[in-house]
Image (tube, helix red, strand yellow):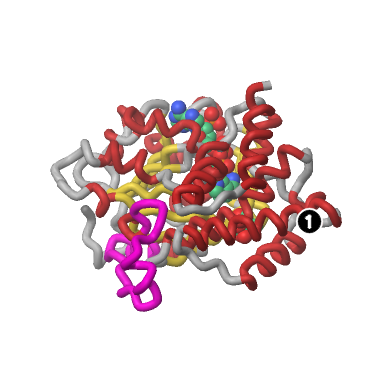
């Protein structure tokens, strides 16, 4: 592991170099960090043309020559890195056992930036098998990206709005519910942000990425679902962008009702989402650029949608805690139908 006093020393591997991984990995590389990108269908295009990033934080181009030895068509050519960022769709998590070992060898950590609930255990199960550390939880960090970004062409990312990463150590949200004990004491839970998380935060800031560490990733994950459940789900079922949904009286009411249900599901799991957060999220959506959620892009491109991690995982977590989420369940069932058709 790199010297933690020297903030430039961490090396980064990006597994899933698309709308999210390409943006944040690209920004780190553009700021001078050593970043290795695993590419998939875009490998040859990026090998010839580099990465093009349009961002409301500032456009940039990573020329092919500058990343020639840092783009990879297979994980086998990737060197062991200090931090492996997972930017795959969760529908591809079954690939992690093949994709993670090479870049995550030698005690590196994994930062899971995908959407959904309970998704970290896939990475943890793999990391646990790698290297010589016995406690896999300490090697898994997790974060939510409050981000509107799309991959619009091979190697071409368009970051339209927002972009903040809120992340922390995974053991803080181990399990999908707070224990009875931690429910009682959650207000004065001691802060437990590891030095590694702090150094990654500093690296992100140095690269111009808005980021903050938290000791409450369970709250952060439910907070993110507050947007994803209504807006990813309805964007597919009603075939509409975020703007079309929020500007329509009935669709906006439906989004609010879904948010209230997410708030109840979270509460059953010991997570308090304040009412103001619902209003703030609706307001942000009203003022944000029209956005096609990545789930809508997947649906339109006939790719698998993240129905399990975004819908079924919270429905089941809440049900296990005694709270039904019938509207979210109905969305999941409709999405399942559309997926199969
Ligand atoms: N986009 C956004 O603004 C946000 C996304 N998220 C979450 O981030 C995660 C990623 O989403 P997003 O970036 O939008 O998705 P993208 O589809 O844009 O990116 C996923 C990337 O994974 C790559 N990939 C697929 N299969 C493989 C493979 N076998 N080996 C290597 N790479 C592979 C894809 O490559 P290829 O295209 O060549 O197949 C693609 O570049 C999801 O969980 C999403 O919900 C969270 C917040 C915001
Ligand atoms: C950008 C957006 C709207 C979605 O990621 C967000 O910030 C949220 O979830 O509230």
Q: At 49% across and 56% down in the image, what residue appears?
A: 221
Residue 299 position, x and y percent, is: 67, 31
- The reply to whether the residue tagged 1 has its Cβ within 8 angstroms of ligand 2 is no
Q: Looking at the image, which residue sits at the far bottom?
A: 188
Q: Quadrant of residue 235?
A: top right
Q: Nearer the viewer, residue 237 or 242?
A: 237
- What kind of secondary structure does the magenta stretch mostly adopt? helix
Vertical order, 66 against 254 (above or below) = above
Q: Looking at the image, which residue sits at the far top?
A: 341
Numbered range of the magenta stretch: 173-202
User: Is residue 290 shown to the viewer in this render?
Assistant: yes
| Disc 1 target residue | 252
Quadrant for ligand 2 reads bottom right
Residue 34 position, x and y percent, is: 36, 48
Quick one: SS at disc 1?
A: helix
Vertical order, 239 against 209 (above or below) = above
In reply to whether residue 156 is colored magenta, the answer given is no
Residue 35 position, x and y percent, is: 39, 46
Residue 298 position, x and y percent, is: 63, 33
């Amino acid at each position: 592991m790199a010297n933690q006093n020297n903030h430039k020393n961490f090396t980064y591997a990006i597994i899933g170099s698309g709308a999210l991984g390409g943006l944040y990995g690209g920004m780190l590389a553009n700021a001078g960090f050593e970043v290795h990108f695993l590419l998939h269908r875009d490998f040859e295009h990026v090998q010839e043309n580099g990465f093009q990033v349009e961002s409301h934080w500032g456009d940039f181009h990573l020329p092919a020559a500058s990343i020639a030895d840092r783009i990879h068509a297979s994980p086998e050519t990737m060197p062991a890195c200090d931090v492996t960022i997972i930017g795959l769709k969760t529908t591809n998590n079954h690939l992690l056992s093949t994709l993670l070992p090479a870049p995550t060898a030698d005690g590196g950590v994994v930062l899971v930036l995908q959407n959904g609930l309970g998704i970290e255990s896939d990475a943890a199960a793999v990391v646990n098998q790698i290297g010589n550390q016995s406690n896999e939880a300490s090697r898994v960090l997790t974060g939510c990206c409050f981000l509107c970004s799309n991959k619009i062409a091979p190697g071409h990312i368009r970051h339209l709005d927002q972009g903040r990463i809120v992340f922390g150590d995974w053991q803080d949200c181990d399990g999908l519910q707070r224990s009875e004990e931690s429910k009682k004491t959650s207000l004065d839970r001691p802060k437990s942000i590891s030095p590694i998380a702090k150094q990654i935060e500093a690296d992100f800031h140095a690269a111009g990425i808005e980021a903050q560490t938290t000791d409450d990733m369970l709250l952060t994950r439910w907070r993110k679902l507050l947007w994803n459940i209504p807006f990813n789900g309805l964007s597919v079922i009603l075939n509409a962008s975020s703007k079309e949904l929020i500007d329509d009286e009935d669709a906006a009411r439906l989004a609010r009702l879904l948010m209230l249900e997410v708030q109840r599901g979270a509460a059953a799991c010991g997570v308090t989402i304040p009412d103001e957060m619902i209003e703030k999220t609706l307001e942000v959506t009203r003022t944000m650029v029209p956005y096609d959620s990545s789930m809508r892009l997947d649906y339109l491109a006939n790719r698998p949608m993240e129905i399990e991690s975004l819908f079924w995982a919270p429905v089941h977590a809440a049900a296990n805690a005694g709270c039904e989420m019938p509207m979210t369940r109905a969305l999941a069932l409709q999405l399942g139908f559309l997926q199969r058709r």
